[in-house]
Amino acid sequence: MDVLSVSSMEEAVSLLHSKRNAAIIAGGTDLLVKRARNKLSADPLIDICGISILKGISHEENCLRIGALTTFAMLEQELDAYPFCAALKQAAYEMGAPQIRNRATIGGNVVTGSPAGDGIVALLALDAKVELVSESGKRWIALCDFFTGPGKTIIKPDEILTALIIPQQSGKSCFYKVGKRNALAIAILSVAVYAEIRERKFETIRISVGSAAPIPMRALRTEQFLLNHEMEETAVHEAIRLIRKEISPIDDVRATAAYRHELAGNILQFLLQRLGM
Amino acid sequence: MALRKISCRVNGITVQKEIRSELRLIDFLRENLQLTGVKEGCGEGECGACTVLLNGNPINSCLVLAVQAEGADILTIEGLAAKGELSRLQQAFIDYGAVQCGFCTPGMILSAKALLDKNPHPTEEEIRRAISGNLCRCTGYQAIVDAVQAVSSNIPHAQPQPLSPVQEKDRLQ
């Protein structure tokens, strides 16, 4: 297997275009696990770690631009400056372990497309867009339209995910994950909520759930119900009932579907209470 | 077979080699440089036995390609006692009985070193979080945390607390 290291986007997209069986490698914490399990047939690997413009968070007009190569360790440190992104900071804090957070990138997390992806769940609640670049140009797509199945996305073979774009917002967000242990836990279930609450009413609300369906999902029906509703007990109870109906988790090695249904409601209640405070 | 040249610093020494491009960093360190203090446990980033410091930060060397370490500064356990004298952290691991089978120890010490380099006086919680990516299957975490705490305390040469009879019994079992 050949590994080609590039230092510019031009090089990267032209190589990806010309090498049919190529794959992109960044932090490698997903890709090299796949290889260790003999599930990687790509050759060559194009190492994009040297493209420095893809690293870090920048504040642009009305939005945050998170470069695809921003590591979870960097997210954990730098998101304090953007309190409305608390959900993403928390997801970064809980993802993997220090060794993984020092290498794993947010772009990789999104492209891997795991239904359990911690970063993805937080980004969904923050209404992020992905930026995709190929030789033929750039396109932007809402993250909620990016996933098509477990580990499957709409990214084309010649495209590179270059950034996550989050609109600047005035509300609050939070994230909660239940796993088997604190470190290196794949979510049994995770929920992120973004809300703008005025006079106890939900003026904006977005809820996303991980490990609850074949893709990381938005709980749109639960959101629709809560929108413009007052934050009070009966509304929260109805939201709990709705989110349990809306998700479609499975039984697997980590937990049963029944337990995940239970968790989804309980975590949502906990997060709504926290945001209401 | 695709070959690539790599140049990096390992334990303070500049190294230049021609290697197979798909080689993992762990293989480069163990096989090309004979630094066998780097251990392979799971090969999937779950156990932390292969932890080394890359530019001061702990990483799993089983999940990094050697060519990705081009130009980097790498520290393995062999680099801690480079002049033949154990570092304070290594000595504390011995003093506190923090080494049982020893397989996790190099990674554990390097994770702790990365923490102490950035945060010389961490809380117990910070220590536990810093070593959360390193599994010890002898289940000796308390002694490990104690050893790191001893180095991080303000006392220049911390003395280990004598073990209680119960701990002593556990230790011997």
Image: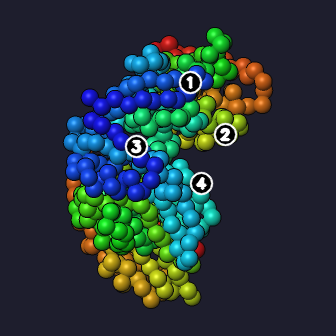
Which of A110 and A48 lies nearest the eye of the viewer? Answer: A48
Q: Residues within 10 Å of mark 1 (few under 14, many from 20)?
A: few
- The correct choice, above or below, for B15 with respect to A54 in the image is above
Estimate how packed mark 2 is, as few (under 14), some (14 to 19) or many (20 or more) residues with alpha carbons within 10 Å: few
Residue A21 in sight from this viewpoint: yes
The residue furthest right is B155
| Subunit that carries the residue with mark 1 | B
Q: To which residue does mark 3 refer?
A: A5
Give the numbered dot on residue A77: 4
Instruction: Return the disc, 4 or 3, that comes first in the chain's sequence.
Output: 3
The quadrant of the image that shows the C terminus of chain A is: bottom right
Q: The disc labelled 1 sits on which kind of residue? A: Thr
- Which numbered marker is on residue B14? 1
Measured Cα–Cα span from mark 4 to mark 3: 27 Å
Residue A25 in the image: state x and y as whole percent: 36, 46
Q: Is residue A260 visible?
A: no
Quadrant assignment for the N terminus of chain A: top left
Secondary element at tag 4: helix
- A270, above or below A95, in the image: below
SS of the residue under disc 1: strand
Query: Real-space Cα distance between discs 4 and 2?
Result: 13 Å
In the drawing, what numbered circle is on residue B118? 2
Q: Is residue A56 found left or right of A213 in the rendered image?
A: right
Question: Percent position (x, y) of residue A33?
Answer: 32, 40
Q: Which of B46 and A135 is in front in this view?
A: A135
Residue type beneath disc 3: Ser
Separation of disc 2 and disc 1 at Cα? 24 Å
Q: Which of B156 and B64 is in front in this view?
A: B64
Do marks 3 and 1 share a chain?
no
User: Within 10 angstroms of label 4, few (less than 14), some, or many (20 or more) residues?
Assistant: few
Horizontal relation, residue A179 to residue B116: left or right = left
